[in-house]
Amino acid sequence: MIKNDEHKILQIIKFSPPLVIVFASIIITFLIYVDYKNTLEVEKSQIKSSFINKKKDFIKEHVEIAIRYANKELKNTELKLRSKLSHQLINAKTIINSIYKNNKDTKTKEEITILIKDALRDIRFNKGRGYFFIHEMNGVNVLHPILPSREGTNISKKRDKNGVQRFKVVQDIVKEQTSGYAIFDFFYPLEKEKQKKKLVHVDKFEPYNWMIGTGEYIEDFEKEIQEKVVNHLSSIRISEDKFFIILNKEGTIISHPFKNYNNRNILKDDEFIHFREQFEQVKKLKDGEGAYYLNNHSLKLSTNEKIPKLWFVKPFDKWNWVITTGFYLSEIEPLIKEKEVYLEKKYTDYLNTIIVSSIIVTISLLFISIYIARILEESFLRYKNKLEDEITENIKQKNILEKAHEVAYIGSWELQIDNMQLDLSDQALLIAELSSNYKNSEFKALENMVIKADWQDFYKAVKNTINTGEELKSIYRIVTSSGQIKWIHCRGKLNAEKNSILGVIQDITETKNLEKEKQKQEELLYQQSKMAAMGEMIGNIAHQWRQPLSSISISASGAKFQKEMGILTDEIFYSLMDTINDKTQYLSQTIDDFRNFYKPDKTKNLFTTKSVYEKTIKLVSTQFLSKQIQINDNIEDVEIFSIENELIQVLINILNNARDAFEKTKDIKKFVSINIYTEDKKVYIEILDNAGGVPIHIIDRIFEPYFTTKHQSQGTGIGLYMSEEIIKKHLNGNIYVKNKEFTYEDIQYKGASFTIVLDKFTNSTKES
């Protein structure tokens, strides 16, 4: 009985732990599996939500950008119109002053007046709407190209529809300010019964006490701005099937990628019947509000099929517009599916790992509980299991290492120093495209594979490792049996105990090819930067040539006219010819200046900071003057041994960025300060503006390629990137940027400070 009880107890002791372990393992595994399924479903749902939200944010952001762009253009309408009228009136005054100066000593006022009227009468601009008029200060009209019947009559009493005496207002402007602007209601030429707002710009011609003016209907100019915005937004393709659509609040399509849709009304045309209900909701949106709408009948450009699409719509009430874009739900389905497959694989692998781990633990515990009574066998089996585990792990690690070598194109080798016999691994043979016959071969056999120009350096590196024990590092090229040239990175260490060198070789051909490709890309960026700079320079040439060409034209016309009238004296003739010759020489010198800048000379030479400054200012000064930007300088004249033209290019890039930054400033005195000084054998070139500085959230990114805060039609984003590349790689210097607050003429300013640091010239500088 006792033996039976003992036997039962022993059986319980022997089998209870395994049963408990198996049962617990099953329960734990089941709970883990249930948790896995729940977690997987939650993550799938979150992924779909995340993808849709990202896409919604994406299309909303682009519509917001389009609205901001339209707002910006609208706000600048009157400012741009003023600038346009001012430019035209300056041209008119230039013509009048030229005629007056050339004839005041030889003709009467009446004769000069006829010449001026004849010169201005047929001039038109703003698509034929713009013209010039002249009044005397007492209200008598001198010139009116559109209504010549008014010439010689007094128009001072005429009023607009609001009772405003137009002439009195502009008369006061000219008397008090000489020049200015006013807005009146004028009869509209195309609808003569209506009066519309017109911006008028007037200026005074002192010699004859005249009022000269021109104007433009604000509504017409605003339509041009709207057309510009429509053309710009319609030219943008966010992606192949993402585009902007613009409608007015009445449902008429203003801009659509399908041109045959333009000017059609979605509320009246049955082809758009599926959009009507949603558009009625859109019409209820207030200015500044936006909304998403899902439409199941949206036409896809690339396939011409109608499928579900999520739209983001936002009104722009100032122009009675609605701007929208969207994305097709079919776009994100493959992405979601791919992510779900990835998650399922990830969780399946995780579950498999848990199951395997659970089985291993269960089996281990079973063995422990079973063998606890067999102490002698337990020691042997433990040792045996440990040994098997180590062998398995070693095999596993070996397989992992071989796989890693295969993936990284790495092969191992060993060189016996005594007989210079080389032992190559299978992966090394594969890299070199050698048969197994070369697995054990003489070291000299490599000479037939290594390119001759690289062999001597490689051989010397091996000998150096043998003689000094230093680590072997060598990069060389080989020609494989297929004729392919491969780049090999070889490393090795001396094993003194075995009297051999153990090492690895790695195929770095792809890396070398990527380096070459990167170099090509950098060269391309440099050319793009040069072309961008060339565009700026062409603009500078145009500015610098405009006045001399005008002088030459006026001198030639004056000489011809006086010759025809028989009043051309030798003194006047030679004076006019001297003027033409002087201006021609100036134009020629301008060409030489720009041609010298674009000479493809990358040779380092000795030059001074003063000469670089003067050449740079000569190339950009005209545009700075035209934009009323003052240039202050404090130049320490020192010698630099470097590439002069590339330094000039960098200075022009930075100055042009400063010039463009002033476009966002208003009502301040604009200036750029250039300070050149030396410190600790270094030359510092600081360019400081007062345009407000660089926004703090982008200041660390402005030297990145293709990064720009300008519109795509105004900038490429490579100017400052190439400037940094030139300074660091070509001129061996550094360039830094920071925002700086400073006081100038007792006024506090803030601006961007660019500092270039170069080596000051010494004899050692030239030798290096």
Image (spheres, grey):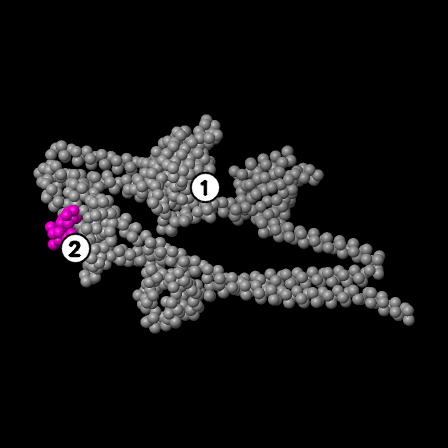
**Which residue has dot 2 on it?**
158
Q: Is residue 255 above or below residue 429?
A: below
Identify the residue shown where x is 34% and y is 73%: 270
Q: Secondary structure at mark 1?
A: strand
* Front-lying residue, 610 or 677: 677
Type of amino acid under label 1: Lys
Is disc 1 in contact with disc 2, using a CB cutoff of under 8 Å?
no
Q: Could you tell me residue 57's position as x and y percent? A: 46, 60
Label 1 crowd (10 A; few <14 / some 14-19 / many >=20): some
Q: Secondary structure at mark 2?
A: loop
Task: Check the picture and name the quadrant holding the N terminus.
Answer: bottom right
User: Which of the numbered marks, if any, corresponds to residue 738?
Assistant: 1
Q: CA distance from mark 1 to mark 2?
A: 58 Å
Q: Is residue 137 magenta?
A: yes
**Magenta stretch mostly in which secondary structure?**
loop
Type of amino acid under label 2: Lys
Q: Which residues are magenta?
A: 134-157
In the rendered image, is residue 461 in sight? yes
